[in-house]
Amino acid sequence: MKKIWRATCAAVAAFAMAACTNSVTSTGGTTDEDIKIGTLLDVTSWDPAQADIGFDGPYLSALYDPLIALDKNSRPVPGLARSWRFSTDHLTLTMNLRTGVKFSDGEVFDAAAAVQNLRHLKDGVRSGQAYANVTAIREVDADTIALDLKKKDDALLYYMGVGRSWMASPAAIEAKTLATRPVGSGPYTYDEGKSTPGSEYVFTKKSGHWDDKTYPFGTVHVLPIADPTASFNAMLSGQLDVAYANAADIPRAKDKGWNVASDVATWVGIQFTDRTGKELKPLGDIRVRRAINHAFDGAAMLKSVGQGAGVATTQVFPAGRPAYDEALNDRYAFDMDKAKRLMAEAGYPDGFEVTMPMSSIFQPWQPSVQQTLGKLGIKVTWKNLSPADYQKNAATYPMFVAVLALDSNPAASVDGRITSRQWFNPNPSTKDFPEVDELIGKIEKADGEAQVTLIRQLNEKITDLAWQDVWYQADNTYFSVKGVKVTPITGMMFPTLRFVQRG
């Protein structure tokens, strides 16, 4: 399953501050030999098949090379795969591999290693969703591999680039030791002696790495710090050079002369899992779903809960990207009177009863949801769950409060938000809406600008159908000291190291 839960983790600030060691310079500046990065969460696993691509990027990108990377515009660029091509029927992806690369244990990277890695990733609990359409992975020759597909997959290269094509040592895969002992061919090695798991991870730059110029820092320290206040204070004291930040601290960061980088990362709102009304009849009526959309003031919620860091919108396609349509944001203007009329027209003037899950992560939105739905007569009974159980069980309810990751690639957005089964969308229900199903079929056959045009039409259609209730898209924000530039990538909760540069 593709790890969409990474988005919800952005709302968490419930852990104690990780221990910080002294920075190289008291002013927080960096040298060629040192950079300290504060990210929100600890590494979930060193095994690329088990890791969360959201916040694991800084950790894994230090140790592993990807087959395919992304550029700043989320376009696929060469990694260990020097080039690639799809067959004319789009059912075979052939990749030409880089030669002369070895893993840190001396194992050689070649076609056999790439095939073993991709099969490992396809079988992974978290990574497997990226390869859902891959039916076979085979070696063509010593430096060429081929992936056979059951159908055209325009999101595959993006998924590989966003964090699902890290290559590990075949011997470590075979030994099943990757989860705790990473072995890659990446630009850095893991210095266990200087690292304190859970507090600070130290990576030392290799000599002669094939992509040496992309990684300007000699030593990289990654510190998981869940408390935004602690992270900000660590920046102030010079213990960090880069930090995953709280948007409320942006004015103070600018006063300090730090660089501030932000971009949309998640959508926030109510996810409908029962659009056909099989479990909760009222949700099968489009007028009820539209009423719920009109009842929430997304701009006000962005300001009050989201600290103004983001975009008030009705869409699940990221703002500023090709499939996003500014005109759709007026589709569900805040209008409680209209919402009540729609409820009455649907036959529910006094509302209905619904049970919704709740956990500590989502409590900032709970009062507004309770009050707003209450004005429509919708009586909510809350079922309290732990954060871990929320992910497992939220989608068993007909609707729930959601903070879900965005993807910058339009085809990946269609796949991840609409058509494929995900933990938050166990019943995509596209077949129950003929116009949606027809558009999806056209999108799968199209390419280039023609495909983007169709995806924009799909965006308009699902917005019109009130596929979900989106209040706003929330930013992720990063602070960095002078001389260090962070480039946010929608789809990565924390960018990989190639997006932390001098500048």
Image (tube, helix red, strand yellow):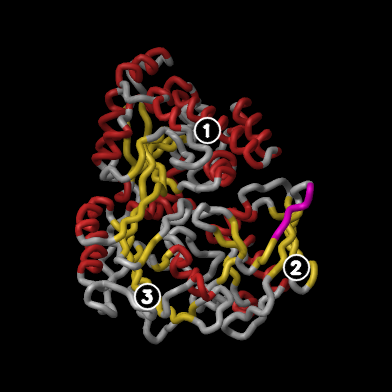
User: Looking at the rendered structure, which numbered label has been put on residue 144?
Assistant: 2
Whether residue 318 is visible: yes
Query: In this figure, which residue is indicated by the disc labeled 1?
Result: 459
- Circle 2: is it few (<14), some (14-19), or many (20+) Cα within 10 Å? many
- Circle 3: is it few (<14), some (14-19), or many (20+) Cα within 10 Å? many
Q: Position of residue 259 (x, y in %)?
A: 31, 59
Q: CA distance from mark 1 to mark 2?
A: 38 Å
Nearer-the-camera pick, 291 or 414:
414
* 347 lies left or right of 78: left
Asked if residue 169 lies in the magenta stretch, the reply is no
User: Measured along the vertical axis of the image, is residue 104 above or below residue 138?
Assistant: below
Residue range in magenta is 84-88
Mark 3 vs 1, N-terminal side: 3
Instruction: Determine the main secondary structure of the stretch shown in magenta.
Output: strand
Q: Amino acid at mark 3?
A: His
Q: Residue at x 60, y 78 (%)?
A: 172
Q: Amino acid at mark 1?
A: Asn
